[in-house]
Image: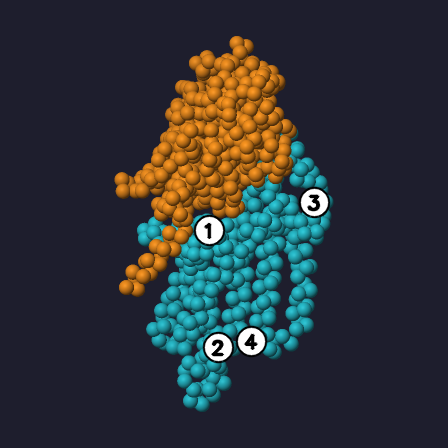
Amino acid sequence: MPKILKRISLVLPTLLLVSIVIFSLLAILPGDPVTAILGQEATPEAALALRAQLGLDNPIYVQYGHWLWAVLHGDLGRSFVDHSPVVDSLMQRLPVTIELALGSFLVAVLIAVPAGIMAAARPRGIANYVSTFIALFGMSVPHFWLGMMFIVLFAVKLGWLPASGYVPFSEDWHGNLLAMLMPVVATGLRESAILMRMVRSSLLEVLNEDYIRTAFSKGLKDWQVVIGHALRNAMIPVVTASGLMVSGLLGGLVITESIFGIPGMGKMIVDAIFQRDYVTVQAGVMAAALMVIIVNLAVDLLYSMIDPRIAK
Amino acid sequence: MAKRLASLMVTGLMAGIGGSATAMTINISLDNDPGKLDPTRSSMIAERMVYQSIFDKLLDLDETGKIIPMLAQRWTVSDDKKTYTLFLQKGVKFQDGTPFNAKAVEFNLRRGQENNSLRKNDLKYVKQITVVDDATIKLELSEPFAPFLSILTDRAGMMSSPDAVKKFGEDYVNNPVGTGPFIYKGRLKGATLTLDKNPNYWQAGLPKADQVVYKIMSDVNVAFNNLRSGQVDITNRFPYKELSNTNAGAKYTVINKPSLGFRGFYFNTSKPPFDKKEVREAIDILIDRAAIAKVVYNGAVSAGHSPFSKSQFANGPADVPPKVDLAKAKALLKAAGKETGFSFRMTLPTTPEELQVGQMVQGMLRPAGISVTLEKADLATQIESGKAGTYEALMVGWSGRPDPDQNIYDFAVTNGSLNYSKYGTKEVDALLQQARIESEDAKRKVFYDKAMQILVVDVPYVYLNHDNVLFGISKAVKGFKFVPDGVIRTVTLSK
């Protein structure tokens, strides 16, 4: 456990560092927020008034100080663009991104694990060739293209699913599930390809170990050896890959979100960057960083459950 | 059996998504998420679309672009063209119950003149506002200003509830209250913005629909797929490449009408090589506008050579693009001492179409020995470099306004707010000023024609084309009227 505690103690310094880096990057971005917000029609008076209102007339370190002070008091600020509290946007967007990321991950695992096991258990069987083909296809085909194809088939031609859009789960659960089905499958398919190759190769490696031969020689059936003996050890690299995958999914599914009109974090951050909505960018990136840290912690915990030696 | 069951389940679930069958909802896709829901703070067209449903204006435009009554049922203009008297609709109430009257108009116009208002420039000539009685207001201008009525047909003429503005303060931008046909209900940022019918709307029998939902779809192809699948009734953009695919069996039609705007690029006349007008003119006559309109826009723009599109009275002979003339261009370059050619940097927007335009311009200038480096930038960066004069050539278009003055004055007058070219001549300044003072369209056109005669030779700005407004509209939608300002009126829509 001490290792985990050490990891937890690093969370705050990491977030602080991330906030400084983001603040500095935004400061050197060309095009200032006042111009982005007011557009071509801004009068000098309007620009001055807005600059003062947003506190942009202060030096960058003062702006950062104000921001940090407010955040420490639980205030993430208000959007430069529409003046709504950033915490409201985050609360609207976070569940969407988490749902999309976890849903995609679930699809990926549901496809990858059984297919990977089958491919490894019968390296010269048909399952191996089929799964290798699917993996190659999944990795080669861009998921935005797959998403578009899904929309054309299931929404436009067949009319079964909504082409895009989002309904919160709390408002209409089946509407939510229907809206999320295509994006989750489109992203999940791609991720499953990567995960499946990982499961397969890791399992193949373990299956060549001496203790597996011992297990076979004891007269155990194939599935008993694979599931009972090999899988647990083969899962360690897979868990690492899964952790990275979930972090990636949480951090940015901008293209999936754009194609399917899903108001997630990725799109929020990108839109906010274009609008120079510094407050929103800062909050979005911090939230994404926090989620990545939490996922990494969870992966560490999982390791120690799979192989208690790692925790020590 | 299993297949049938599955299809029943899907149909059942779909019915759930659609909501109850009795409520009539018009779904409109917008390519941008509207920011502040307050006309005094607005800077983008997506916002004007939404405002149109929430706020009525003092005046409006009809389908021919003519100014018609709205909250002001009639008006008079004094002989010296400086005093406008507006006679207001009686008995109108804002959505929060606040009465609409002359005092409310005064409140809104004064609010539009405040320092942090983006309408300040529109209303800068309004010197005095006098409430004559509850239904009459008198506006005195500091000087004659012909575009004034036209300005009241857009955001400067939109009326907010004074009570709501006072009540919400800075938060009014998220709590808009007008007298319009639909009431703001709420938004899911980046996804939807919902408006409900105003049951007490002052115009009998309107609005027709129960609800309007704006869906944010930044990708034009995504919006198009939603139109095809029936999730969206109207899209505020339409993919150019799909224009030729609209067949008779399609469930939608396309509105393809000239807008009031223009596209083109600025020259920075304060720096070489564009400080020489021969160089600017040479480039201007090397560009084949018709080819750009055909190749990039599938014919959905018209080649142009002035800020005035065909639907505006100021459109004149200058709008006819020059013939491509390599020999003349080379002669002009020689006169400017640039016969061996030169290179310059063109900053342009990030859309694929504008990049293609840039590439075509690149190819068209090459025979004269001019090489162009293309550099993409988002709007904020472009405006900044425009204002600072740090660019060489800068492609920024204009979505257009109903009065010609609003499409040329600030672009061409010395020190104009949109004059990124840093251009200025006394002749053009005087002509544009005279066009503002004169109130008859025919007489104003004479001044615009003369100004354009100078501008097509001086070329501070290369006009390339006039964009068309492209809306995709489901055939189920009834009551759609196209108004040349390109803003969708929802009040008459039904399905």
Kind of residue sitting beneath label 3: Gln
Pointer 4 indicates a residue of which chain? Answer: A
Q: Nearer the viewer, residue B51 or B266?
A: B51
Q: Nearer the viewer, residue B372 or B442?
A: B442
Q: Nearer the viewer, residue A39 or B127?
A: B127
Q: Colour of chain B?
A: orange
Check whether the beta carbons of the residues at disc 4 and disc 2 lie within 8 A of each other.
Answer: no
Residue that label 1 marks:
A166
- Which residue does the image show at 71% across and 46% down from the upper left? A66
Check whether the beta carbons of the residues at disc 3 and disc 2 lie within 8 A of each other.
Answer: no
Which badge, 3 or 4, comes first in the chain's sequence?
A: 3
Query: Residue A271: percent from the left, percent from the top?
Result: 54, 46
What is the CA distance from the residue labelled 4 to the residue labelled 2? 11 Å
What is the CA distance from the residue labelled 1 to the residue labelled 2? 38 Å
Residue that label 3 marks:
A63
Residue that label 4 marks:
A306
Pointer 1 indicates a residue of which chain? Answer: A
Q: Nearer the viewer, mark 4 or mark 1?
A: 1
What is the CA distance from the residue labelled 3 to the residue labelled 2? 52 Å
